[in-house]
Amino acid sequence: MRQRREKKEIPKLNLIPILDAVFIFIFFLLMSAQFVEIYEIGSDAPAIATIDTEKSDEKPLNLTLKISSSSIEVKTGVEGALKTKITKLGKEFDLSKLKKVLIDIKLANIDERSIILSPSKNVNYKEIVKIMDSITGVGKDIPAIAGKSKNGKVVRTRTLFDQIIFETVI
Amino acid sequence: MATRNKRRSVIVKKKKELDIDITSLLDILVILLVFLLKSYNPSDLKLDLTNNLELPESVSLLHGNQSVTIQVNKNRSVYIDNKEIGKIPKTGSNIAFLEKKLKEMKEQGDKELKEFKSRDLTSVDKDLIKSKERSNKQINIVLDQTLSYSDMQKVMHASATAGFPKFKFIVKGGN
């Protein structure tokens, strides 16, 4: 006797609730979507900049970048002693050299986060943004730097000087 | 007999379900979902750029917050919350019209904050007050990349003297 083959019915998934959820999710994402990625770079006006008020015998770092259209002068100390002068490589500043100098300074002053920018009036905003980028962090290519803080603890960080103050605002 | 057969055929017809193939629709939805998830931005800052304004590229990954937004385009026209209020003068060290407008906005913000504080507060409200206090001090500065520091300085000067000492420079994410 030939046996009857029973047709196997494929069970159907109920996709309706999943589709509902996906639709709601899409509407939510569409509302919050921003097709130009925008970020911010923070800076404080000099009058309200937070200054470490703890009294100590150590001299303040007072790290200052004097930016002109042809060079960047890295100065430190109250007297503003010139540490390095960075010139342009072609049309752009040698920012990798600037970063190296700042990493060295950061290693010696791991607790320090403030930097003063003093650009001359004809410096382009685009160039200032590039400089701000290279002074705030060590970048993707360089590993985190480590140094001893004032408390004697070893601090590992990827941040260089993220408290930017423009000298000539007020 | 014939009528019974007819009735049976009607019943069979009713049982047939309409089967729509939604596989392609699901494919589209999944692609859309991935694309939208990639462009998702958790920041509450919504920026509608004015004409003739190109943002500089930056490696910064800090998301902005909603607060008073100043935009200055290539022609040095100044916009506050997308309304043109004037043009930066070539001479002089400050922008009087911008300072005046910002002072008005600051006063209004302080007034709102005071009213809000006078109400009975829940823990949620307290968080709101904190974020409002923060946004009352900060200002989003959106400048065209071709502008010079002299223009940037004038904008910062007007903002700081009006009571917005925390500047947030809005930049475009670079790859």
Image (cartoon, coloured by chain):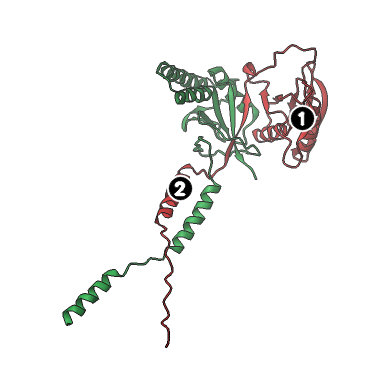
Chain colours: A red, B green
Give the CA distance from mark 1 to mark 2: 49 Å
Above or below A38: residue A50:
above
- The answer to whether dots 1 and 2 both sit on one chain is yes
Point 57% across, 42% down: residue: A37
Residue B90 percent coordinates (x, y): 59, 26
Between discs 1 and 2, the one toward the N terminus: 2
Q: Which mark is residue A25?
A: 2
Point 51% across, 43% down: residue: A34
Point 77% across, 41% down: residue: A90
Q: Residue A38 carries which label?
A: none
Outermost residue toward the bottom? Answer: A1
B28 on left or right of B74: left
Outermost residue toward the front? Answer: A1
Q: Mark 1 points at which residue?
A: A72
A19 on left or right of A61: left
Residue B83 percent coordinates (x, y): 45, 31
| Amino acid carrying mark 2 in the image | Phe
Residue nearer the viewer, A123 or A130: A130
Residue B146 percent coordinates (x, y): 62, 36
| Amino acid carrying mark 1 in the image | Ile
Q: Residues within 10 Å of mark 1 (few under 14, many from 20)?
A: many
Residue nearer the viewer, A148 or B115: A148
